[in-house]
Image: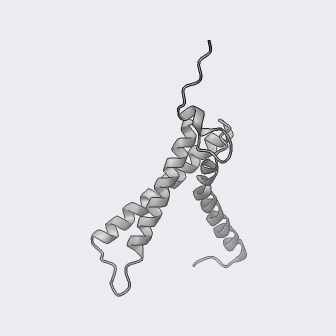
Amino acid sequence: MTEAPIPGPASTLGTGFAHLPTTKHGRWAMWLFVTCVVAVGLFLYFFLPIQGTTVDAGWRGVAMQIAAATMVWTGLAGSGFALFALVRQHERSWTVYLATVPLAFLVLAMLVEILSAFLGQGAE
C-alpha cells in the first residue's frame, strides 16, 4: 500500500514563476529584498520630514544613515543571492527576479555617470 505524500512546504510551493522560491539562496534573496524595501520606506520617512517641520540633526540624521546603509547592503546582497539562485540553481520564482532590481538600479546609475562623463555633462 502506497502512502500519500505528507503535505509540506516543498509540496505546496511549486517550482514555476508564480510561486515562492524553493532554494535556500532564492529565499535569502527574497527576504533580503523585503528588508531592502522596508529600509527604503524608513529612509524616505526620515528623509522627507512632515511639512512644516525641519530635519533634526540628532536622532533623525542617525536613523536616516542606518536606513540608507541597510538599504544599500541588503539590496546588493539580495541581488547577489538572486543572481546565484537564478544562474547556478535555476530558480524561477518571480520574487527572485524582483530581487535583482537593486543591482539593475546600480548598473543603470553607473552607466549614466559614465555616459555623462564622456558627453561632458558630468557634475563638476
Q: Is residue 90 left or right of residue 40?
A: right
Count of numbered tags: 0
* Horizontal and vertical percent position of residue 99: 58, 52
Residue sitting farthest toward the left: 58
Q: Please tell me which residue lies in front, 52 or 122.
A: 52
Q: Is residue 4 above or below residue 94?
A: above
Q: Please tell me which residue lies in front, 18 or 91.
A: 18
Residue at 61 percent across and 54 percent down: it is 98
Look at the image and tell me in which quarter the N terminus lies: top right
Residue at 46 percent across and 54 percent down: it is 35
Look at the image and tell me in which quarter the C terminus lies: bottom right
Q: Is residue 3 above or below residue 102?
A: above
Residue sitting farthest toward the top: 1
Residue at 53 percent across and 42 percent down: it is 27
Q: Is residue 68 above or below residue 79?
A: below
* Horizontal and vertical percent position of residue 122: 63, 76
Residue sitting farthest toward the front: 1
Q: Which quarter of the picture shows residue 42?
A: bottom left
Q: Is residue 8 left or right of residue 63?
A: right
